[in-house]
Amino acid sequence: MPRTVKIAVIGSGLAGLTVAHLLGEPAINGVELEVHLFERASSLGMDSSSVSVPLSEKGGEWRIDVPMRSFQGGYYPQLIKLYKSLGVAFRQADFSYSFSLLSPPAKGTQRRITTTMIYNGASGREGISMPSALNDPCRDAQAQHAPVLRRAWLWLATRAAFALATLTIVWNYLRLLTLSVPCLRPAGLETQSFGEWRAATAPRSAVARWCGMDAAWMAFTAQVLVPLFSAVCTASEPDIMDHPVEEFLGAHTRARLRLSPRRLHMA
């Protein structure tokens, strides 16, 4: 009769489920492993932080995966091998997503989700799209049968605002890439949190402040980087602000360097 060894696996995330599965093999060399999986949440760890958003118009709800159920093929070759060996199905995806703001709660009004940026995926090759909220003035003017000149002016102003916003995002992203290069990182970075780093790296020249680039950098880090890192790490905004920035910059650099030639994204 094989000897039984009890093993506790803490957490039912991807790592915990994988370990529990691999240890749950038949007895080897007279030893049978009895695996006990512990999870503090009411559901499996991979889904315990997901969010359900009610759909008031159609009824039901929209399940938002937290963290994102997607991965980059060139960056996770071992994960792909693991999924294939387990028979877990996955498919190629465009890896598009958006960033939105949730209006604060107010008495008598329903909270609204306003999209601020739409990322079209394909490792950035597809660019970004204009959020529908930015085009609301044009639609309102058309619905109110406003004069043609006013509608034309609103159309031009909206496109100009979107073009300026796009250039600002591109500039800040290129700045992020530059600040992520190991040889260009300032001394003492290993002791800085993300919140300290974003404040320390804000443009400080008179010209930059006059152009509003310091405010644009703070907005970019708050509205793009914070929700992105929050989704990846399954952490709150305060936790992201207190997180060591060196880990974020290192992961970002490795992701850029280890992309496969086709840059496939899976889900």
Image: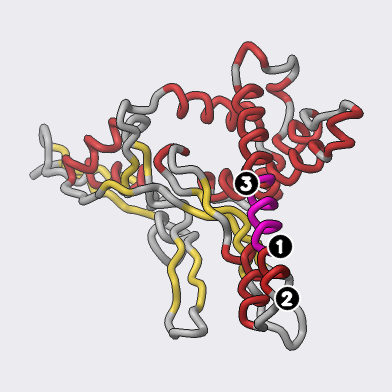
Q: Nearer the viewer, mark 3 or mark 1?
A: 1
Specify the amino acid type for callout 1. Answer: Trp
Q: Which colour scheme appears in the figure?
A: secondary structure
Question: Considering only vertical position in the picture, is 215 above or below 254?
Answer: below
Residue at x-position 33% and y-position 27%: 260
**Left or right side of 151 for 87:** left
Q: Report the Cα–Cα distance between label 3 and label 2.
A: 22 Å
Mark 2 residue element: loop
Mark 1 surroundings: few (<14), some (14-19) or many (≥20) residues within 10 A: few
Quarter holding residue 185: top right
Specify the amino acid type for callout 2. Answer: Pro
* Marked residue nearer the N-terminal end (3 or 2): 2
Marks counted in the figure total 3
Residue 89 painted magenta: no
Q: Position of residue 228 (x, y in %)?
A: 56, 46
Question: Residue at label 3?
Answer: 224
Quarter holding residue 189: top right
Question: Residue at label 2?
Answer: 105
Q: Which mark is residue 109?
A: none
Task: Please report contact status of discs 3 and 2: CB closer than 8 Å, yes or no.
Answer: no
Q: Quadrant of the N terminus?
A: top left
Q: What range of the chain is rendered magenta?
A: 153-164
